[in-house]
Image (cartoon, rainbow, N blue to C red):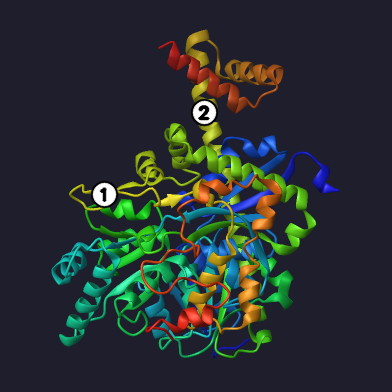
Amino acid sequence: MTDMNMNTKLRIGFIPLCDAAALIVAVDKELVSAEGLDIELVREVSWSNVRDKLNIGLFDAAHLIAPVAIASSLGLGHVKVPIVAPFGLGVNGNAITVSPELYAALAAAADGDITDPMVSARALARVVAERKAKSREPLTFGMTFPFSTHNYHLRFWMAAGGVDPDEDVRMIVLPPPYMVESLANKHVDGFCVGAPWNSVAVDLGIGYILHFVSEILLRAAEKVLAVRASWAAEHPDVLRRLVRAHGLAAAFVEDPANRDEVAAILSAPNRIGASAEVIRRTLDGRLKVTPDGKLRSSDRYLMFGRKGAGRPDPAHAAWLYAQMVRWGQAPYSTEMLATAKSVFRPDLYDAALPREASNMAGEPVDGIGAFTGPPFDSNDIERYLAASKVRR
Amino acid sequence: MDPTLKIVIVDENPVRAAILEDGLRESGHAQVVRIDDMSHLLARIYAIDPDVILIDLENPSRDVLEQMFQVSRAVKRPVAMFVDQSDAASIEAAVDAGVSAYIVGNLQKDRIKSILDLCISRFNAFSRLQNELERTRSALEERKVIDRAKGVLMKMKNLSEEQAYALLRKTAMNENKKIAEVAQSVITAAELFK
């Protein structure tokens, strides 16, 4: 009857990124203590570690990149361990950053406003073709993991311009802390990563933020609070308390009056360990996008609790599975689609937190709101994918 | 043991990597390559074309290795994590020790079980060594603090060295603290009164 005990001890793994905010605030503002939970946060260095430690039970829960939760549940690339996500830690938050050289080349090749992702994607296609004609090395893009939103977001964007991510450019995995250094030493020409790394590159004068991912997809599930399905079934009350604390924490993070405090909490060396000022920019969705100080703001840049961001949406899981199918990481089957969707558990969210339907006004009808292509249909991803010209 | 197996160790800690390499060589593995520079990691691994890759879990580049699972032109042979569901005990022991193993190609598992076991025991030995070093270092630090506090007391209270130490010891016992803690307070107080 551990569920009835107060002070239930839990170990939760996280990667030092801004979208761990709700988890970190839940622990450091003692919102979890109020729920009778005693949580040890363990900072990790790789998604592989987080996945393995969650899978084998060294962690009770984890800040996990959403596609890894789905891949683990489908047994793709690794062992099959069913994972469930009862809470969304963040919607959006990634950005695509390119080197000054690539930025200049894209600007020169653009036939319109380069902040329009279709214009920039077509410009990329021209730059790629020109390099090919001159027999130059293909461009290299960094992303964080084979099963990552960053991988899919980059691919979605460039494929819209006709660039084949597997044939026309190189896509390589880079741990987020190495992204900036790799851009500086020209190991990569661009990358897609979460906060604060894009801002770090801009501050160093070696990167231009080309797009917030929210310009490519209005709503993209990013990190989730992940637990083993078996653990969720065995500890329903602990899970409910954990989700409740996260809901309160996300609301705290969202309140502009708390942002300085939140940025200070997150900046601690044993949490994210980046400057509070840079973290604050992320929370505000107001980022310096060029080294000479041009600013871009978006109220969709990184969403914690607002606009229903905390409530897992199975359509997002289906979209991520569709990307795995599109790029040859997974075969298509209706069973796998159903399994992928069942990873995102709005019912577990609803069991712990009140649902505010009103704040979904104006959100995309298909749940995604992509800048190009047909509306997403989570029940018919085969037909949705048939519209993609570039795919495996 | 199998002298034909090519083994790559990816570890930024040169001491630990050397300990592991020694162990592998002692047990008859002649082909061991160490990588401690993480740039262009995959390209280097493809060039070496190993049968087994060992990587420490403190290494963010573990995610880079995961790319090898993906079907691509660069990967000529299938890659798998050494441990799977059937090896729950092995994976726990490995993660606990802080190491992960990948096998390339279609190696029989029993051929590398001994490698992983050796890896686990050497990693554990290394962390024991590190803990001991840490203890020695903090013991030395404590000695220094106590010596400084004795000096302060000798000067300010006109005590002999033995008397100064006896005073620290008595105070520590009365306040239920460690001598080093009391010594630190003496130093802090002396700084304040300077």
Nearest to the observer: residue A143 or residue A209: A209
**Label 1: element kind:** helix
Q: Mark 2 lies on which chain?
A: B
Inspect the image, locate mark 1, and give the three-letter code of the amino acid beneath it: Asp
Question: Does the rendering let one see residue B36?
Answer: no
In the rendered structure, the answer to whether residue A342 lies left or right of residue B143 reads: right
What x and y, as percent, mark residue A73?
A: 64, 71
Q: In which quarter of the image is residue B124?
A: bottom right
Residue at the (64%, 57%) spot, across then down: A346
Q: Which residue lies furthest to the top in this view?
A: B157
**Label 2: element kind:** helix
Q: In this view, does B59 lie above or below A238?
A: below
Q: Is residue A187 above or below residue A304?
A: below
Q: How far apart are marks 1 and 2 (CA)?
A: 42 Å
What x and y, as percent, mark residue B98?
A: 59, 63
What x and y, as percent, mark residue A305?
A: 53, 46
Q: Is residue A270 above or below residue A119?
A: above
> Residue A121 bears which disc, if any?
none
Nearest to the observer: residue A170 or residue B6: A170
Residue at the (71%, 50%) spot, across then down: A351
Q: Which residue lies furthest to the left in this view?
A: A108
Tag 1 near tag 2, CB within 8 Å: no
> Residue B145 bears which disc, if any?
2
In the rendered structure, the answer to whether residue A124 lies left or right of residue A43 reads: left
Residue at the (64%, 42%) spot, across then down: A245
Q: Quadrant of residue A172?
A: bottom left
In the rendered structure, the answer to whether residue A177 lies left or right of residue B178 reads: left
**Rendered-image quadrant of the N terminus of chain B:** bottom right
In the rendered structure, the answer to whether residue A333 lies left or right of residue A158 reads: right
Residue at mark 1:
A203
Inspect the image, locate mark 2, and give the three-letter code of the amino acid beneath it: Val
